[in-house]
Image (spheres, rainbow, N blue to C red):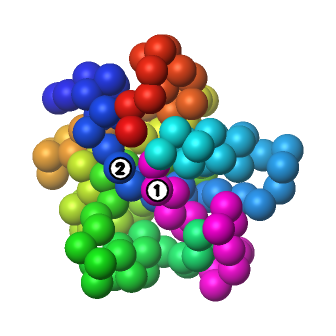
Amino acid sequence: MRTIEQILRAARTVAVVGLSNKPERASLEVASYLQEQGYRIIPVNPAYAGQEILGETVYATLQEAADALASSGTRIDIVDCFRKSEEIPPIAKDAIDVRASCLWMQLGIENQVAADLARAAGLDVVMNHCMLIEHRKLGEQAA
């Protein structure tokens, strides 16, 4: 398994599952920061499907997002999860289906079943870590 630093340096496209357009939500703060660092953010949230958040179209599912990106030859590198821990296993299955490289569960989110599933399929797994905090630790832009 790659280190967090290796994952962040290799990634270009981050699907943010559960991204909200509400300024008080951590998902928007993290996604905005990552976008400023040069990552392409792909919002995934059925509640906002078809709308735009951070200038990017919101998709209802990871599969819809992956299908839309495929036409331009872009793939999802990291699936960044802002959902409750118990909601992660189906997201892990979707991450595997779209051939993402990494399943990332944000601070406070852990699900061993999802982690085992993703690892068995060859994905890197990060649990209970914030991408913004981890990126800042690098001390330089990873993207």
Where is residue 80? Give x, y as percent.
Answer: 48, 48
Of residue 2 and residue 110, the one placed in the foreground of this image is 2
The stretch of residues the image draws in magenta is 39-55
Q: Residue at x 56, y 48 (%)?
A: 35
At 39% from the left and 39% from the top, the residue drawn is 143
Describe the element under mark 1 as helix, strand or loop.
Answer: strand
Residue 44 among those drawn in magenta: yes
**Label 1 or label 2, whichever comes before in sequence order:** 2
Viewer can see residue 63: no
Residue 101 belongs to magenta span: no
Q: Nearer the viewer, residue 113 or 6?
A: 6
Q: Is residue 99 visible?
A: yes
Q: Residues within 10 Å of mark 2 (few under 14, many from 20)?
A: many
Residue 111's spot in the image, x, y percent?
44, 39
Q: CB atoms at circles 1 and 2 under 8 Å apart?
A: yes
x and y percentages locating residue 23 in the rendered image: 84, 49
Disc 2 marks a residue whose amino acid type is Arg
State the residue at coordinates (71%, 42%).
29
Q: Is residue 86 above or below residue 18?
A: above
Label 1 to label 2: alpha-carbon separation: 6 Å
* Pointer 2 residue: 12
Q: Residue at x 14, y 46 (%)?
A: 122
Q: Which residue is mark 1?
A: 40
**Label 2 element class:** loop
Q: Nearer the viewer, residue 137 or 98?
A: 137
Residue 91, disc: none
At label 1, the amino acid type is Arg
Name the side, left or right, on which 91 lies relative to 118. Answer: right
Q: Residues within 10 Å of mark 1 (few under 14, many from 20)?
A: some
